[in-house]
Amino acid sequence: MDITPCRGRHKAPRLSTLELVKEIHNRSGLDIDGIKLVISQLCDVTKESLAMGFEVPLGDLGCFTFREVKPKKNFVVRNPKTKEELPPKDYPGYFVPRLRVAKKVKDLVKEQMKYE
């Protein structure tokens, strides 16, 4: 696989969507427009399912799940510059989506990314 080095704040090389499409095209022989459509639809269905509260499995990669952020009662906020305390406020709880990576993928990455 031919990966271009990443620019910016990311330390690891980053695979762009176009590079991903080209790699799938090279391995499978499917047309590029079809691959782009499938990736786009996968992203749309995943976002819609997460918004409705469903967990989304992604084959051998892992599963999108949720992490709960608990509500905060009478939470005091301070202005970091002036150290002034603002009146206490209640913050509701909510859920944050997260990707739980499969153990096979974790082990593969751990094995491939070893360094001395």
Image: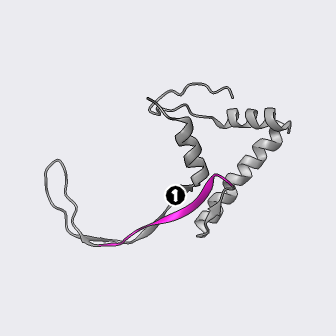
Indicate the position of residue 100 as horizontal and vertical percent values: 54, 57
- Tag 1, which secondary structure? strand
Left or right: 66 in relation to 35: left
SS assignment for the magenta stretch, majority: strand
Left or right: 26 in relation to 43: right
Q: Nearer the viewer, residue 104 or 79?
A: 104
Q: Is residue 69 magenta?
A: yes
Count all numbered tags in the image, as a single digit: 1
The quadrant where residue 2 appears: top right
Question: How many neighbours does mark 1 have within 10 angstroms: few (below 14), some (14-19), or many (20 or more)?
Answer: few
Q: Residue at x 69, y 37 (%)?
A: 20
Q: Nearer the viewer, residue 112 or 1?
A: 112
Q: Magenta span covers which residues?
A: 60-72
Q: Residue at x 81, y 39 (%)?
A: 33
Q: Quadrant of the N terminus?
A: top right
Q: Is residue 3 magenta?
A: no
Q: Nearer the viewer, residue 53 or 63?
A: 63
Q: Quadrant of the C terminus?
A: top left
Residue, disc 1: 98
Please, is residue 24 above or below residue 4 in the view? below
Q: Residue at x 14, y 57 (%)?
A: 84
Indicate the position of residue 61 as horizontal and vertical percent values: 63, 52
Q: Residue at x 77, y 49 (%)?
A: 38
Indicate the position of residue 108 as horizontal and vertical percent values: 59, 43
Q: Nearer the viewer, residue 78 or 32?
A: 32
Indicate the position of residue 6 as horizontal and vertical percent values: 53, 28
Label 1 amino acid? Arg
As drawn, the residue found furthest toward the left would be 83
As drawn, the residue found furthest toward the bottom would be 73
Left or right: 68 in relation to 3: left
